[in-house]
Image (tube, rainbow, N blue to C red):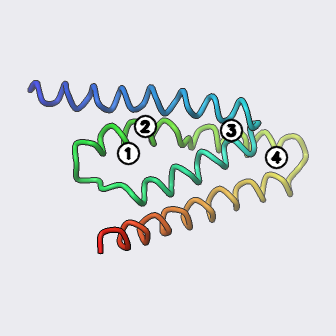
Amino acid sequence: MKLIHLYEAAAVGAGGFAGAVVRHLVVTVTGNTMGIIAVNVTGCLVMGLLSHDSKFALFAATGFLGALTTFSAFSGHAVKLWNSGDALAAGAFILINVLAGISAFILGLYLKAQFAS
C-alpha cells in the first residue's frame, strides 16, 4: 500500500469523525425526524456544491458528508414511524427526504455553476 493511500484514508476518517459528531449533535438537539431531514438535505446541498475531483473532496464529501448524511438512520426512522402506526408520517418523512435531498443537490450544482462563472 502506498503512503498516499494512507493519507487519503486518514482524510476520509477525519472527515467521517467530524461528520458523525455533527450529525449526532444536530439530531440530538432537533429530534430524530427533523434532525435527520436537516442533515440529509443540507448534506445533499453541500455535496452539489463540492468538486469531487480534489483531495479536499475525500475529507469533505466522502468523509464528512458521508457520515453526516445517513441512509441507515433515515431507513430506521421511516420503519419506526411506520411500525408506530403512523403511515402518513412515514410516507411524508420518506418523500421529504428524497425530494428535498435531490432538489438540494440540484440547487448545489446550480449554485456551483453560478459561482464558477
For label 3, the SS is: helix
Disc 1 marks a residue whose amino acid type is Ala
Q: Nearer the viewer, mark 3 or mark 1?
A: 1
Task: Tell me residue 84's x, y (percent).
Answer: 88, 40
What whole-number distance in Å separates the C-alpha atoms at marks 2 and 1? 6 Å
Q: Nearer the viewer, mark 4 or mark 1?
A: 1
What whole-number distance in Å separates the C-alpha atoms at marks 4 and 3? 10 Å
Disc 2 marks a residue whose amino acid type is Phe
Q: Which mark is residue 64?
A: 2
Decide: marks 3, 2 in contact (CB < 8 A)? no
Task: Tell me residue 55's x, y (percent).
Answer: 22, 42
Q: Which residue sits furthest left?
A: 2
The C terminus: image quadrant: bottom left
Q: Which mark is residue 82?
A: 4
Q: Residue at x 8, y 26 (%)?
A: 2
Decide: marks 2, 1 in contact (CB < 8 A)? yes
For label 4, the SS is: helix
Q: Nearer the viewer, mark 3 or mark 2?
A: 2
Task: Tell me residue 35's x, y (percent).
Answer: 69, 41
Q: Counting residues from the N terminus, which is met first, the one under dot 3 or under dot 2?
A: 2
